[in-house]
Image: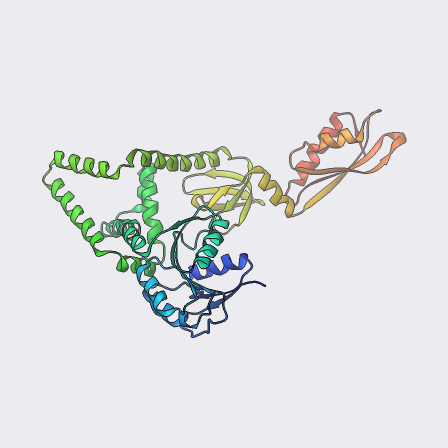
Amino acid sequence: MSLKAAIVGGYGEMGRWFERFLSEREMDVTLVGRSSHAHCADFDVVVIAVPIDVTCDVIAQVAPQMKPGAVLFDIASVKVKPVKQMLTSAPQGVELVSVHPLFGPGMPDMEGQTVIVTPVRGESGRRFLVDLFENAGAHVEELSAEEHDHLMSVIQGLTHFGYIATGVTLEALDFDIKRSRRFMSPVYEILIDFVGRILGQNPALYASIQMNADRSVHEAFLTQCAALVDIINAKDHDAFVATMKRAAKHFGDAEPALKRSNKLVMANIKELEDFKRSIGSKCGLRNVYSGAVHVGVIKSASPREIAIEERSKDVILKTENVQLMPEEEVARYRLARGQRSRDFSATFPPGADPTIIARVLSTIADVTAVGVVDQYAPRQSYTFRVSTYIDGDVERLQHDVTQLLEGIGCKLR
């Protein structure tokens, strides 16, 4: 019998994500609006997937209803307050865990993603969720609520603040970001993309993260920005160098960070080179977000756009949205869509072996299957059925098969 799960706040993006995630693991999932007063006593697993600002209020409403042995967990990006509320509101016997997925709803699954688990009460609930996430390919880290919130005030509070501050500064300067990309190095383009990545997401979520971050982090950032401005205004070259050296020494990971960032830059460069090498070839492109597949001849490739001729029409795709599919995967995709065939009848030279002829015909580009469908042995006459993809070029197939058969001395009928 499958577990029954409720996702409170399940109509939001992360709520929907967890609906799919739990359903794929054969749980019977019910979505519960955060403003409803749905009874949660019958559920084995309850997920609190609401904005940070109302997480504690929703826990206070839902937790008292739950049965012993059930698992309650939230997915907020702060932990101290939700954990305290769980312990206050949940009856004894309810398994309590606080979870922070370090990814957004745009991720297709947990494979390779990090999930922080804060154990609250009950070993079986903690083990259940850790196994659930690890079996899905996630990297699980366990932290106390206090350590989590301290780390996230810097990891999220500071870094998001810096990206958002850069974005609003670009707006204040009326800086033409689209035009400027023509002049950016790969490193700075990646930085600008990360600014855009944050700005393009749910501003209410990021507002909640900033409002709940440790204020001392923001104050330290602003203090150091002001100090740097003072050094620059004073044209104190030595002080600037000394400041940067001190920061690098504290950072400690600068050289490995340089190597990791170089790998990221080189991966971006290699992807574009692969697109350019594929110009003129029939390829498959998959949209990494929607999963849509385009098969056709790549006409052009730039850092911004890929042009592909698909079924005699030019389709323009954003480079950042697509990836090249391996040849084997393209072949499987095309076969799954179906095949079409042409029959070729011919008289063959004495001693011709139809099995060998079929093997040779199968080497022609885009030929998916070859079979003998008729034969008249005394005259060495055979009919071959040659198949290609449903989107294949049948006229080219006709030409190539005819040319090969005539080239080995066959007379087509």
Residue found at x 25% / y 39%: 251
Residue found at x 42% / y 36%: 267
Nearer-the-camera pick, 259 or 280 = 259
Quadrant location of the C terminus in the rendered image: top right
Nearer-the-camera pick, 12 or 367 = 12
Q: Is residue 286 above or below residue 22?
A: above
Quadrant location of the N terminus in the rendered image: bottom right
Decide if residue 254 is on the left or right side of residue 288: left
Coordinates of residue 21 in the picture (x, y in percent): 50, 57
Decide if residue 197 is on the left or right side of residue 24: left
Coordinates of residue 19 in the picture (x, y in percent): 49, 61
Q: Quadrant of residue 120?
A: bottom left
Nearer-the-camera pick, 159 or 58 = 58
Type of colouring? rainbow
Residue found at x 64% / y 41%: 392
Decide if residue 355 is on the left or right side of residue 64: right
Residue found at x 34% / y 52%: 198
Coordinates of residue 41 in the picture (x, y in percent): 47, 72
Coordinates of residue 47 in the picture (x, y in percent): 44, 63
Nearer-the-camera pick, 169 or 89 = 89
Say whether residue 22 is visible.
yes
Say whether residue 52 is visible.
no
Residue lying farthest right? 378
Q: Report the label total.
A: 0
